[in-house]
Image (cartoon, rainbow, N blue to C red):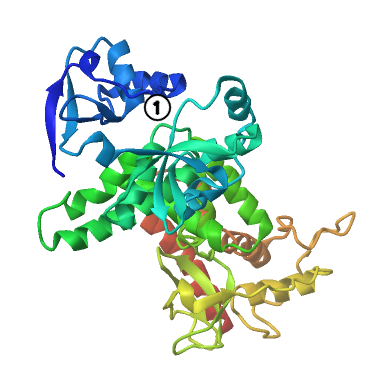
Amino acid sequence: MTQTLKPWNPHEIEIPPHLIADDDGVAKIISDFNSNGSIPDITITESGQLIDGVNALEAAKRLDQGVIIAIVTTATTEEKIQIQWIPIELLDPHPINTQIYGENEDVAELAESIAKNGLQEVFTVTPNADRFTIIHGHRRRLACIKAGLTKVPAKVKNFSTSEDAIAALLSGNEYREKSIEQKAREYLAWEEIEKQRAKSRQGRTGEGQGTTRDIIAKRVGLGSGVNAEHAVAAVKALDEVKDPVKKSQLKMALSKPRGVDAAYKLVKPSEQKQFSRWIPKEGDKVRIVKGRYKDKLATVTVVLSLCALCHVEGNPEAKRDQIPFTDMELVEEVIKPVTSIQQEVKQQQNDLGLGNRAQVLPDIKRNTGIAPVEQMQSSATNLNVVGDSLVTEVAIALIKLSPKQMGEVFAKIEDDLSTQQLEAIWQSLRNHFAHKAA
């Protein structure tokens, strides 16, 4: 049996009585033709008798096509088409149809039409021992059972390979309404067919490895190869997931016309989280978890892009070590409330890295010459003192500021100080207290 492509007048093609066009299918083909200018395959005999594609032929006529390109086969109608009346209980659904489209389809309206007007289209089946496997007509079978039919007309067709049978089944569902999940399962079926066909070609040129993915994606209505792969990843996750909540979320996303992105995000949370990382802040107390200073405590002084300059406890005050963020963890400090000025000084000593020495600053009472009416809040800077105590109070207040905050202060006094100058002032204050503590 050979096949060739020939131009043919659609009005001259003879339609056998058992082939009846479906109006909905014809309307769908006309709509697609207006979008992309193509009509599905129409297969005829050499004498011009229609073998397959009755909806496409009717669409071509309604579109006033004077000439179409038909597939002409040398097989006779009897060789190509064997119409038999088959008991409906001998018809078995194809496993791939159930896998892709499911079993719980609503056929009430179709069953009512069949009961009222009769069966308008024959089945296409392939023999399987003493039974028959359906290629086209799965919904029709359910509707016929519902309508009470016991025998149905079927076109019996032998296929060279199981891949050819599945390809015919998929092609017959090209114009049905499908969910993203069904399209993704079609993609997987076509992908397997193309793999088997590539093996049978044994080195002969096919569609091309680089484009097969995109060709199949377009064929099933998923657009691009990348979009198809995302849909397939979501469907595979749907088959494997045990959590009923996540399964329901995936089902819902895949049921929407544009649900690929939403479904893909549900199955790829790790890729979204891999870029998030903990970043310390200046002044944070951290514990070193790796490297030469493992298990030591440190204070972050400068934050860089992937690491921080830290003062490791026990090292000289001026020494700063570069520690990666991944080598440290935050230490949650319990800060006791300050209840007296003496405790405040001790806490400030610790904040400045001056240890617990009994005396750091000159022994001058903080409130010399001042008799405050009420106890000053210990957390506030006391600017009512004089002499060295005032200098100390201001210095302590300044050292609490970050370089950026100090810049804002000095900008009110001298607005042309550079960042380097401000950082030098800030560091000199720290060094001054370190020197006093030595």
Where residue 215 sits, quadrant-wise, is top left
Residue 261 visible, this orientation: no
Q: Is residue 77 above or below residue 302?
A: above
Q: Position of residue 436 (x, y in %)?
A: 56, 79
Quarter assignment of residue 373: bottom right
- In the depicted view, which residue is nearer to us: 342 or 65? 65
Which quadrant does the N terminus fall into? top left
Residue 418 placement (x, y as % from top left): 37, 51
Q: Residues within 10 Å of mark 1 (few under 14, many from 20)?
A: some
Residue behind mark 1 = 18
Residue 110 in sight from this viewpoint: yes
Residue 228 relative to residue 149: left or right: left
Q: Nearer the viewer, residue 262 or 379?
A: 262
Q: Secondary structure at mark 1?
A: loop
Residue 310 rendering spot, x and y as whole percentages:
48, 75
Q: Residue at x 43, y 53 (%)?
A: 232
Say left or right for 304 vs 80: right
Q: Nearer the viewer, residue 234 or 286?
A: 234
